[in-house]
Amino acid sequence: MKYGLVVPTYRSILDAGRTAPEMVAIAVEAERLGFDSVWVGDTLAKAPIDSLTLLGAFAARTERVTLGTAALLPALRDPLLSANAILSLDLLSQGRVTLGVGAGFAGRSEPEFAFTRVPWERRRARLDDIVALWRHVWSGKSGPFHGDVLHYDALPEYPEPHRPGGPPVWLAAFTPGALKRAGRLYDGWLPYPPDVADYTDGLAKIREAAVRPVTPALFATVLIEEDPIRARERLEDYAQRNYGVPLDFVEKIQMQIAGSPEQVAGRLREYRDAGAEHVLIRIATQEPAEFDEQLPKVFDALPR
């Protein structure tokens, strides 16, 4: 099983004192420790450091790790300009890019779509069209493209990507419809279900619908804390500061684990045994000093 580190980039950690150059240093340290990949999020709700810009800085300072988005919201960008930006990142990193993408989270993402004047309606069809358009131009095609939402009679010509066909694209979603779409249209699946049985069931549905190899991944929020009471308090603080909602709500939809190294490893093994092949680790703290302290502890706890 491979492991990736989610580098926190949102306003909350910037407000706590983390700087953009320090984010790049985290990616360098993650590679030194032995992580297989480094990832950044994407939002306009409280605009963070731009994800693709930051991955470009990661590309310049790292040599081995995969560089990923977890998850990019493609609808917030012009599809052709984003195709060019991602292709440029692919060439700069010599083919180390993987894109986790999403259509937005109902109840939270609507303002982001409003900021960019993109309709919220048919957002999933728009996402699928954007990914299909990217693959279209990354494959050297400049002829017409007509999807369900996007329509182009002509397209610019792009350079040939480092990896034939361009970077792999993983779908970050867990709805019944998303499971079918992941199997038919995407190269990977990036969910965060709190129940391993749901992960097992979802992966089975994807494989039933799959027409291409699909990498099963997992987004996991992790904290090393031996004291169970303190562990719960720290997860509660993270949920409130990151989402503005109680932990009771967040843990119903997201995989969260805080405990001893043995407890963390045991929980991750459950998902490995269910089929997860690439686990993205998000450390549950908004404090830079705590993150730096947690990073080697979390890495040492990961089951090999």
Image (cartoon, rainbow, N blue to C red):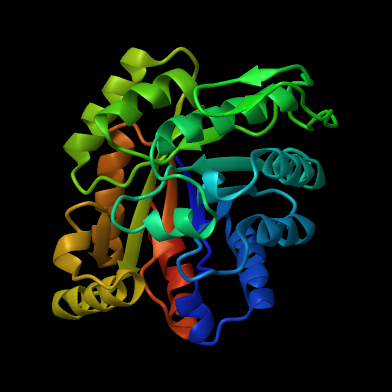
Q: How many marks?
A: 0
**Front position in the image: 184 or 276:** 184
Residue 75 at x, y = what percent? 53, 44
Residue at the image position 55 percent from the left and 69 percent from the top: 48
* Location of residue 239 with respect to 230 vertically, above or below: above
Which quarter of the picture shows residue 171?
Answer: top left
* Location of residue 36 with respect to 209 vertically, above or below: below
In this orientation, does residue 150 appear?
A: yes
Residue at the image position 17 percent from the left and 54 percent from the top: 252
Residue 217 at x, y = what percent? 41, 39
In this orientation, does residue 36 appear?
A: no
Left or right side of 227 for 15: right
The quadrant of the image that shows the N terminus is top left
Residue at the image position 55 percent from the left and 44 percent from the top: 74
Residue at the image position 46 percent from the left and 56 percent from the top: 114
Residue 234 at x, y = what percent? 26, 78
Left or right side of 273 for 59: right
Residue 227 at x, y = what percent? 19, 78
